[in-house]
Image (spheres, grey):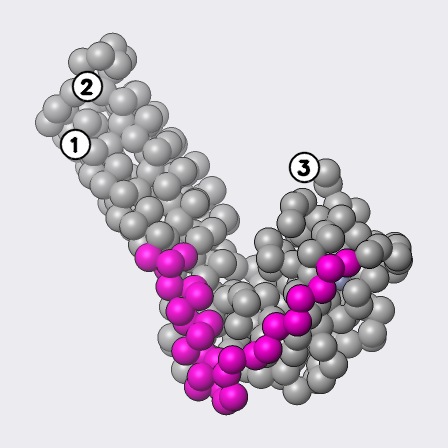
Amino acid sequence: MATKKTETTPPTRRVEHTITHVEAQSTNQQELQHITKGNATPYRILAIVLWVLALGCEVAAILLFLGKFTIPFLKIPNVWQAVIFLALDLILLIIGSQMWKKANHMDPASKKNKLAFWLQNNLGVIVAAVAFIPFIIIALTDKNASKQDKTIAAIAAAVALAIGVLTGIDYNPVSQEDLQEAQQVITQDVYWTAGGRVYHTHEDCGALANSPMLAEGSVTAAIEAGKTRLCKFCANKDGIENVVTDEVLENAAD
Ligand SMILES: [Zn+2]
């Protein structure tokens, strides 16, 4: 995958696009929320399944560390077997958190309920804490383990916890109100690609140069399709501020 340069002025290129017009299905905010919720649900379910599996790996790591069982074919001390399960724990946690963030961007919580908004956007961080802190406490308080094993286990889990927290944070959370504002500010039709995660106000946006197939419709239609942010290049071009924007990650396929 090519690395994308972040430029304030996007390269404008004339490209022939095949454009399909998409009509918005919802006529009011409640209907829109219903549709976006439905689009985000598979990602939420996948996130929860991955997180449950991650916690399963933590339980296995705890049992291995305590010597409750051992995996004979691994032929390494139990403390290292526990570290392997902590690594699996971390991988599942990270993928789950990315799925959860994607779902939150497609179907954001309302800012009106501060606690619900905070919880939904920080769930990945909370799960990261649950995925490693119990292990750290149990490992450090285990009376039978050697000091060396405790150190290895605690460091491995602490590093995993830090990575899990940092990758679980949503640095640019979207709110339901952000989407409503965008619908009011941008009244013209916008463009998006099937695989992208943003919509564009300009058909000749450089980020769309490698995407022959475009969908076109209102911002509402774009949001229904799961594109809840405006491309940063297009926002700069239009001088649109205060509307939720995002770096463009498309260009790859379509
Ligand atoms: Zn754009």
Residue 1 is tagged as 3
Q: Nearer the viewer, mark 2 or mark 3?
A: 3
- Please name the residue shown 57% across and 60% down the image: 171
Q: Nearer the viewer, residue 65 or 174?
A: 174
User: Crowding at label 3, few (<14), some or many (≥20) Cα neighbours within 10 Å?
Assistant: few
Which residue position is annotated with label 2?
A: 71
Q: Is residue 231 left or right of residue 9?
A: left
Q: Nearer the viewer, residue 9 or 254?
A: 254
- Please name the residue shown 55% across and 82% down the image: 177
Please state the horizontal and vertical placement of residue 37, each as a whole percent of the image.
41, 71
Give the magenta-colored segment's residue range: 17-45
Q: Quadrant of the N terminus?
A: top right
Q: In this picture, is 119 found above or below 50?
A: below
State ligand 1's quadrant: bottom right
Amino acid, disc 3: Met
Residue 171 is tagged as none
Which residue position is annotated with label 1?
A: 63
Between discs 2 and 3, the one toward the N terminus: 3
Find the residue positioned furthest to the left. 68
Mark 1 and mark 3: Cα distance apart in space: 40 Å
User: Crowding at label 1, few (<14), some or many (≥20) Cα neighbours within 10 Å?
Assistant: some
Between discs 1 and 3, the one toward the N terminus: 3
Q: Is the CB of mark 3 within 8 Å of ligand 1?
A: no
Amino acid, disc 1: Leu
Between discs 2 and 1, the one toward the N terminus: 1
Mark 2 and mark 3: Cα distance apart in space: 38 Å
Q: Quadrant of residue 86?
A: top left
Q: Is the CB of mark 2 within 8 Å of ligand 1?
A: no
Q: Nearer the viewer, residue 166 or 200?
A: 200
